[in-house]
Image (spheres, rainbow, N blue to C red):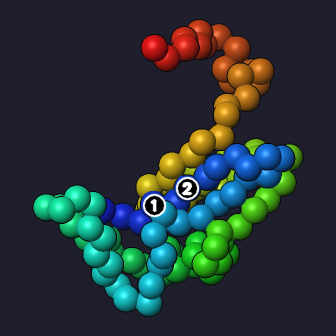
Amino acid sequence: MAGEPEILVEERGDNLHICFAHPISADNINFYKETPTRVKIITINDNHRKIAQITGKDGITVPMNASEEVLTAIGNISSFMTVHSAIAADTSTSNTRNINFVEAD
């Protein structure tokens, strides 16, 4: 199964932690076993390596008050990699005031 690198964005106390789900290597193709019968093939390019240089091997932690800037940057990179974000959305902004939010079951 073909895939792309995945980046994780998580809240950790008063900070955001950003890291890759799997390490970015110097190889152009990485293989990850997802299940006993399924392997994910990830193609790595220079854009992924640039992001990996910024986040470092263990990820990067930034203050929560920079979350708007982080979300903007994450939005920009989501066009060439998968982003998994666990950041709570700010529902008080003018862009969301006419949206009805429904709790999940």
Task: Name the residue type under label 2.
Answer: Leu
Identify residue for label 2.
8
In this view, 15 is above or below 99 = below
Q: Name the element at disc 1.
A: strand
As drawn, is 85 to the left or to the right of 105? right
Q: Which mark is residue 47?
A: none
Task: Name the residue type under label 1.
Answer: Glu
Q: Residue placed at 67% from the left, 31% from the top?
A: 89
Q: Which mark is residue 6?
A: 1
- Near-viewer residue (77 or 37): 37
Q: Residue placed at 45% from the left, 14% from the top?
A: 105
The quarter of the displayed image where residue 62 is located:
bottom right
- Could you classify mark 1 by the number of other residues whose Cα lies within 10 Å: few (under 14), some (14-19), or many (20 or more)? some
- Near-viewer residue (49 or 86): 86
* Residue 6 x, y percent position in the rendering: 45, 60
* C-alpha distance separating marks 1 and 2: 7 Å
State if disc 2 and disc 1 touch (CB < 8 Å).
yes
Q: Residue placed at 44% from the left, 55% from the top?
A: 82
* Residue 49 x, y percent position in the rendering: 52, 80
The quarter of the displayed image where residue 100 is located:
top right
Q: Residue placed at 51% from the left, 49% from the top?
A: 84
As drawn, is 36 to the left or to the right of 76? left
- Near-viewer residue (12 or 4): 12
In this orientation, does residue 19 appear?
A: yes
The quarter of the displayed image where residue 92 is located:
top right
Q: Name the element at disc 2.
A: strand
* Residue 10 x, y percent position in the rendering: 64, 49
In this orientation, does residue 79 appear?
A: no
